[in-house]
Amino acid sequence: MTRSETEEAHLDELRSKLADFGVTLFERPHAVPSTPTPDEYAALIVDLARSGDPRLAHAIPCLLAVHDGDLAATAVARAYAALSGTEADELGLRYRLARCLVASRAPYLSFLFGRRPTLPPLPIEPIDVPDPSELRGEKGLQVASESYRERHLPDVAGGAERQFDTWLDLVRAESGRRESA
């Protein structure tokens, strides 16, 4: 089954918005990343969650690491309110995964961005995934990944982790190009 041209155009628009906001997984940076307003941020999170493309949904933790703190918490809370049922639960999981990834990759994030991103806890996070304070987030990532594998479902946690690491590698490569230029 192929996607229609309209669907592909929408996915291309999402990829472009991610690059505009500093997540260069699918496109090279257009310029200096801009900071989204809380409404733009929430709308992008909703669109990524509903995109039907797991790679775009896995980009949510990357976006949260770039635009962290209260802005991220506000945007996620607004996006959560706009989603229903399973989509909202998935966003809660992706937020917990983002917090675990930020905790486990803190030294690398500090090296790349000159600061350590912070994501405050939110009540939408699943309670069955350990808090990021346990083993610097690694335990949460492991438990979430095992949960999906035991149910013979696609490993959302593992996919998000691989995509996050790929994004960090791309950021490092891009910063290396800028430094050598």
Image: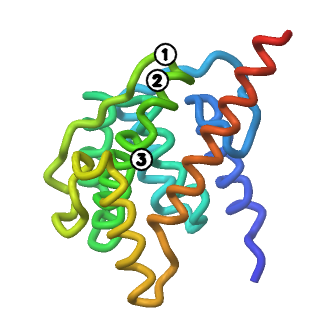
Secondary structure of the residue carrying numbered label 2: helix
Q: Residue 110 carries which label?
A: 2
Q: Please state which of residues 11 and 4 is positioned toward the viewer in this rendering.
A: 11
Secondary structure of the residue carrying numbered label 1: loop
Q: Quadrant of the C terminus?
A: top right
Secondary structure of the residue carrying numbered label 3: helix
Image position of 66 (left or right of 98) = right
CA separation, marks 2 and 1?
A: 5 Å
Number of numbered labels in the structure image: 3
C-beta proximity under 8 Å, tags 2 and 1: yes
> Could you tell me the amino acid type at mark 1?
Gly
> Could you tell me the amino acid type at mark 3?
Leu
CA separation, marks 2 and 3?
A: 13 Å
Q: Which mark is residue 2?
A: none
Q: Given the current orientation, which residue lies at the most extreme right position?
A: 181
Q: Please state which of residues 60 and 180 is positioned toward the viewer in this rendering.
A: 180
CA separation, marks 1 and 3?
A: 17 Å
Q: In which quarter of the image is residue 70?
A: top left
Residue 88 placement (x, y as % from top left): 30, 63
Name the N-terminal-most of marks 1 and 3: 3
Q: Disc 1 marks which residue?
A: 114
Name the N-terminal-most of marks 2 and 3: 3
Residue 160 placement (x, y as % from top left): 51, 58
Q: Please state which of residues 155 and 68 is positioned toward the viewer in this rendering.
A: 155
C-beta proximity under 8 Å, tags 2 and 3: no
Q: Quadrant of residue 106?
A: top left
Residue 107 higher or lower than 3, as above or below: above
Image position of 57 (left or right of 12) = left
